[in-house]
Image (cartoon, rainbow, N blue to C red):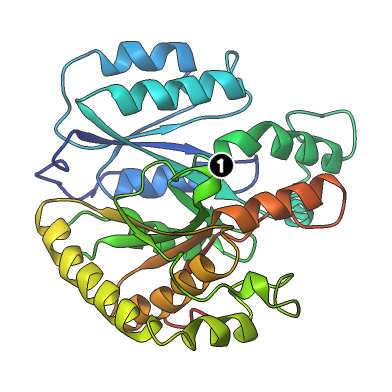
Amino acid sequence: MGQDAPIIEDAPRGGQRLVLVTGPSGAGRSTAINVLEDLGFEAIDNLPLSLIPRLLDGPARPVPLALGLDVRNRDFSTSNVIELIDRLTRMPGYSPEVLFLDCDADVLVRRFNETRRRHPLNPDSEPMAGVLAEIDILAPIRARADVLLDTSELSPHDLKAELTRWFDLRPGKNLSVSLHSFSYKRGVPRGVDVMFDCRFLANPHWEPELRALDGRDRRVQDHVIADPRFEEFFLRTRGLVEFLLPAHLQEGKSHLAVGFGCTGGQHRSVTLVEKMAVALADAGWPVSIRHRELERRNAALHSAGDASPNGEARPTQRQAS
């Protein structure tokens, strides 16, 4: 791999691009590392966390760097990875991103059974026990992801195409956009570049029949859109984002994170993200969606045995809903 990798002449301004690649075993981390190498990254897999600062203290590299983080590393722990992310964020010479390859637990078990591999965290038992243990260990890191890709329904070819959309920095490639909904009560998401406040729009929370629903539901969307201020706000916001995207691409950026916040992060901000994702995808921009509070809600339900661990994050294309 990497023999014919493209030459990337300019690193993103603000620091050398550094992608930390992780996720549960079987979700596609090794495939992702190989794809990033083909895209021109210097890729290193399974490097012990304690050696990463020494690596980065060396001379600057002419190409971006991708580091694979495996739960089997001898010094791997959730706290160590979070500390590493925070440390890299404070380093002016680097522009760090966390790429998390996610996957449904049942799909991971099927992949282990098909390949007759043992799960590294529980080699002497059924794979499901190891899969669930690893998902729990990685949950705080997943919450810090800048790019989260669910590989449950992706073939290796599909995963390569998705990663190429996000990380190919060759001239003429589009900048990727992630849209985040969130609650102001829980703070602003880490890494958001541009943020819009939706709290002035009509709040479906005060409608009893809508309170338990969220902004992915057409009835909630219709309620928010019915606010006479919605159309002008949406058009102005869309125009600003579409103006910013080419400018950021020209500056060498490969990813722009746009946040929409409301009081609870369930209705208005989710509606804006869903509608903006369709508009930007129709305009040809690679878009992904993160609904932070819905992910947290689903994670809580999953802990009680009532939901999938995959949350609400997903890549979005022209068929975005």
How many numbered circles are shown? 1
| Amino acid type, mark 1 | Ala
**Viewer-closest of 252 and 168:** 252
Q: Residue at x 10, y 52 (%)?
A: 251
* Quadrant of the image occupied by residue 90: top left
The residue lying furthest to the right in this view is: 125
Residue 12 location, x and y as percent?
A: 17, 43
What residue appears at the point 33 percent right and 76 percent down from the top-left corner?
280
The answer to whether residue 131 shows anywhere in this view is: yes
| Residue 203 position in % (x across, y down) | 56, 72
Relative to 174, does residue 218 appear above or below in the rendering? below
Nearer to us in this view, 113 or 109: 109
Does 99 appear above or below 82?
below
Q: Nearer the viewer, residue 97 or 125?
A: 97
Quadrant showing the N terminus:
top left
Tell me the residue at 30%/83% (across/down): 232
Residue 250 appears left or right of 321: left
**Nearest to the observer: residue 172 or residue 206:** 206
Residue 118 located left or right of residue 143: right
Q: Residues within 10 Å of mark 1 (few under 14, many from 20)?
A: some
Label 1: element kind: loop
Which residue occupies 18% across, 64% down? 244
Where is residue 184? Give x, y as percent: 49, 50
- Residue 278 coordinates in the image, percent (x, y): 42, 80
Per the image, the residue denoted by label 1 is 143
